[in-house]
Image (cartoon, rainbow, N blue to C red):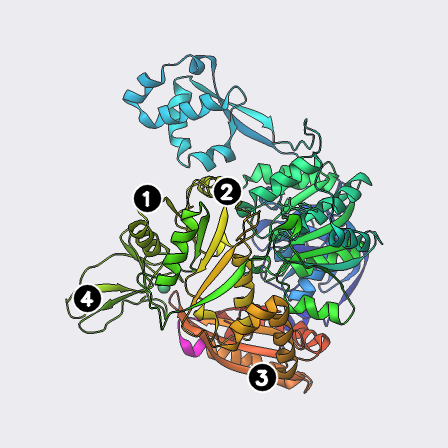
Amino acid sequence: MTDFQLVLRGYVKFVSTDVILKIAVNVPLSREFDYRPPANGPLPIAGCRVRIPFGRSQRIGMVLAHASESVLPAEKLRAVTTVLDEAPLLSAADLWLIRFTSDYYHHPIGEVVAAALPALLRQGKSLQPTVVSVAVSAAGAAADVAAVAKRAPRQAELLEILLDAGSNGLDTGQLTAILPTWRRAAVGLLEKGLIAKRNMRAAHFDESLSAGAQHGPTPNKEQQEALSCLRRSDNFGAYLLDGVTGSGKTEVYLQRMRDIIDQGRQVLVLVPEIGLTPQLIRRFRERLGIEPALLHSGLTDSARLAAWRAARSASASLIVGTRSAIFTPLKNAGLIIVDEEHDHSFKQQEGLRYSARDLAIARAKHLDIPVILGTATPTLEMLQHCRSGAYEHIVLSSRAGGAKPPTIRLVDTVRSPVTDGISEPLAEAIGTHLRANGQVLLFLNRRGFAPTLICASCGHIAGCERCNSRLTVHARSKQLRCHHCGACHPLVEHCSECGQAVTPLGEGTERLEDSLRLRFPHHSVQRIDSDSTQRKGAMDEALRSATAGDADILVGTQMLSKGHHFPKLTLVGIINADQGLFGSDFRSSERLAQSVVQVAGRAGRESRAGEVLIQTAFPDNTFWATLIHGGYRQVSADALAERELTRWPPFTRLALLRSAAHKQADAHHFLDVARRYIESQSAAALRILGPVDAPMARKAGRYRAQLLLQSSDRATLHNTLRYLRPALEVDPAARKVRWSIDVDPIELF
Ligand code: ADP
Ligand code: ZN
C-alpha cells in the first residue's frame, strides 16, 4: 500500500493539541476531511456549515465532530475560511441519522449530508434567506396588456402573470416554475418601468387555519382495538397497521396524530408521492384543523426551505413528505407514520440508495417514539418482523362503513381472446356497470400505444440503439420512445430493414383508450398515466374529475392504483396480469399480489358492491386460486414459507454491487476485482454470486454487470462492505466504470 492509501484508510494519525474539525464534504469519497478552525471568530460546533478551501476551490462542508487527532500532520491542515451558521442547523439526533445512513448504506457521508439538506442550504444560503421578488409597478398595474402584446407577446405574458400575482409579486423560484423563460421578458418590462425587483424575506410557513377541526366517524371495534394498542405507549414501538383497502387505516392515523399533536409534539408522515395524495392531505388539513408543512420535489427551493425550517423549529406540528422528508430535522418529534409501507418509491434507486421506510424505523428507535407502518399489502420483511415479535401486528380485516370487499373473477384470454386489449367478458362487464351508472377503471401498467413495432414482412422489431430494449410506439406524439434511456425517434411507417409496412404489436394505455372510445362512444374515457399528466396541475385535475365521477371509464397505469378513493367506481379490469406470474425476481409473486390487491381495492369503496376482472392466459396457475380464496394474507404466508426454504430475504441479507461501462470487459473486470477483495478478507458465511451481466445488459449505451452478496446475518455483510467501499474508491479499476453498492436492494437489476 502507498503512503497515500495508508493515510486514506486512517492507519496513520497525528495527535494535535488544538481542536480539529471533522468535516463532511459533498464528494464521492468515504471519509471525513480534517480542518483547523478559522483563524478568528467562533469555533463552529457539530451541525454548522462552513466554507472551506478544498483542492483549488472553495466548498461548503458540514462540521460533524471535534477531534484531537488527524490523518494529516498539523502543518498540512488547512483552516476553515468562514463559518456559515452561528447555531447548528442539525441537532445531534439529526447528525446521528446522517451517520447511520452513511454507515448502513455504505455511502459517503458528505453525499448523505447533501441529500439531507434543502438545495438552498446545500448552496450555502442562510437559513432565513432573502429572495428577489418581482412585482408590477404602479405603471405596470395600469398598463394596457393588449398594447404590450402587439409588440412583445412574451413580455405581455409575464406581465399578465405578475398582474395576477398582485402587489407581493412572485419570487424568482416561483417565476421559473411558471414561466421558465421569464428572465428575458423581464429585461424589457424593467426598462419600461412596468415591473420592479425587490428583496424580500423568503416564503414563510404558517400553520394556522381558520376553520376548526371536523369530527370523524366513531371508530368501529377493530379501529378501537388498533387505537388502544397504539396508545399503550408513546415510546418506541414499530406497529404494522395491516388493513384491507378501505378498512379505515387513515382514521386510525388521524386519531393517533391528534393525541401526539395535542401533547405539543410533531408528527412526520411519509407518503409515496405527494402528487397522488391530494385527498389524503386535504383530509389531514380538515380533520386536524392545521396546515401540514409539505416536503416534496414539486416545491420551489424557497418553499421547501420554509417547510424544512418550520419542521426544524417545531412551528409546524405536522410534516408530510415523500422519501427524502425522512431527513427533515424535527425539534420535538412524537410519531412517524409511513403510509403504504410496501410502496417502492420509498426506496431511492440511484445515488444514495436508501429506504425511507427502514430509516423511519431506525430514526423512531433512536428518538424513542412510535412508528406506524400502514398498508393493505405488507411486505414480507415487515410480516416477518411481526412473526418474530419485534413489531406489533395490528389487523383491520373488514372495510369500515359497511362497504363489501369486491368479488374477483378471472377471464381466460385463451378461450376469450382480446381485441385491442379487451376480451368479450370484460367488455360485457364494462357495459353492465356503465348501464348501472357505475364508474370503470382499467389498469394496464404500460404507457404508450403499443410496446412493440414489428415488420409483418421480415419480422424486424424496432429496438433501442443504446439499450437491450424495444422501442414503445407513442401514437399521440407520433414517436418511438425507449422507456429505459429516454431516446426518442419519429414514428416510422416502414421497416428500416426491408421497407415494408410495420405494425404496432400489443397494447399500451393509448391503444386501450382508443379502443374504449370506439366500443363505448357515448361514455367519456379518461387516460391517466405519466404522459397524460405531465403538464403542471394536470394530475390534480385528472384526479379531481375522476373522483367527481366526470369520466365514466378511467384507463391508467400504476399511478391510478395508489390509495385513491373514487366513490362511483364499481368495476376494475386488470388488462394483463401475466407479466408478473413468471417474473425472474424472487419478489415477483409478492409484487403481483400487491399490485392486484391495491388496484382491486379501488372498486366498490362506498355502498355499491365492487367487481374485479383479471384477464390472464394462465387461469389455472395456483397463484390465482390462492389469491382469490386466501387473499393477500395467504399469498404472503405462502411466499414467506418459500423464501425461508430458498433462503431469500427476509431470511437472508443482500447487497448488490453494480457496475456500468462503455466496454463490457471493464464492467466485469471491476466486479472481478471486487470479488477478489471480498474473498481475500471475508468469512465463509458470505455467498458471492457473479459477476454476471445485469438482466438488461446494456442501457443508455453502457454495459451493466452485477455481483450479489448474500449472508444469513447482517454483521457479516456489513463488515465486508465496510472495507470494500473505501478500497474500491481508490482502485484503478473504478476509473473506467460507474459503480454503486445497493444494500437491501429491491430490484435485482
Ligand atoms: P383506508 O385508509 O384503510 O383505505 P379510510 O380511513 O380512508 O381507509 O376509510 C375508508 C372509508 O371509510 C372512508 O370514506 C372513511 O371516511 C370511512 N370510514 C373509516 N372509518 C369509519 C368508521 N369507523 N365508520 C364509518 N366510516 C368510516
Ligand atoms: Zn434506450
Contact, mark 1 vs mark 3 (Cβ under 8 Å): no
Is label 2 in a helix, a strand or a loop? Answer: helix
- Give the structural element (helix, strand or loop) at label 1: loop
Q: Residue tagged by mark 1? A: 522
Q: Secondary structure at mark 3?
A: helix
Q: Return the residue at label 4.
A: 495
Residue 600: which numbered mark, if any?
A: none
Q: Earlier in the sequence, mark 1 or mark 3?
A: 1
> Dot 2 corresponds to which residue?
547
Give the residues in magenta: 661-666
Earlier residue among tags 1 and 4: 4
* 418 drawn magenta: no
Q: Nearer the viewer, residue 287 or 748?
A: 287
State the mark number for residue 676: 3
Give the Cα separation between the discs numbered 2 and 4: 43 Å
Residue 300's quadrant in the figure?
A: top right
